[in-house]
Amino acid sequence: MAVILTRGLFCFFFFFIALEATDLGIHGHVFPIEEEDLLEWLKNKTQALSKEEGEAVKIKLQNHFVTQIQNPTTIKGLKDAYSYQLRYIDPTICADEDIRNSEGKIIVRKGACINPLVYQVHLDALLFFDASNPQQLEWAKKQNQLVKWVLTGGKPLEIEGQEERLVYFDQFGLLAKKFGLQHLPAKVSREGLQLKVEEIPMGRPNA
């Protein structure tokens, strides 16, 4: 099944993203919440439904999520690449506070700087493209088949079935934003202890 919420392959990238979160602190006065608890409200609304109404709501939600998986929203703002662009990203992260694991043990101390690539033995290259664009899809088929396909548009389940390969979808454009992608197709790969980001026009040789 196509991966809509990135997993496994992207553990490194989410680690890279998550540790950059900034604590903005607490500002202004704090007031008690007087509104009804949302979960309690939903529970009460659900209990008020008849068995038939509850089943109808369940089916509606299932259909909604199936539709989202089959036809995820295309990422906006990414244009076709007409010239080759290359840049490097240093993924080194400096912790602004102690980072603990689920058991409360400190795994990264405040002030420590870590490059996740030091600990990542292998990192698959990612090929970003819009599969709803026939030209980009055909171009991707001709590229190095060892790269992982990350769609920014198109129908991942359909493409996965047609091409008989695992397909990922960059839900909400999270990775495209992190890598600063502006044009497609694009490739993100490892080069030493840096991430190599390439925006590749379709007339260029294999990525």
Image (cartoon, rainbow, N blue to C red):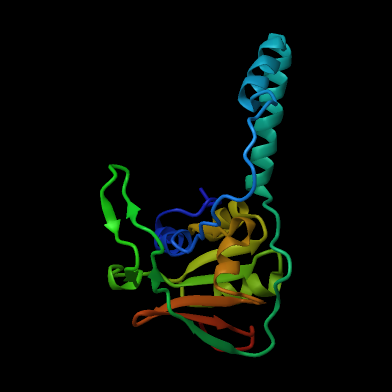
Q: Residue 84 in the image: state x and y as whole percent.
A: 60, 89
Quarter assignment of residue 169:
bottom right
Q: Residue 193 in the image: state x and y as whole percent.
A: 35, 80
Q: Residue 158 in the image: state x and y as whole percent.
A: 62, 53
Q: Residue 31 in the image: state x and y as whole percent.
A: 65, 35
The number of numbered discs placed on residues in the rendered structure image is 0
Can you say whether 199 is above or below 51 in the image?
A: below
Give the residue displayed 59% in from the left and 74% down from the top.
180
- Which is more toward the observer, 59 or 162? 59
Quarter assignment of residue 186:
bottom right
Can you say whether 21 is above or below 30 in the image?
A: below
Give the residue displayed 69% in from the left and 62% down from the top.
75
Can you say whether 27 is above or below 37 in the image?
A: below
Give the residue displayed 71% in from the left and 11% down from the top.
48
- Which is more toward the observer, 141 or 117? 117
- Which is more toward the observer, 149 or 74? 74
Query: In the displayed structure, does residue 27 sit left or right of residue 117?
Result: right
- Which is more toward the observer, 10 or 63? 10
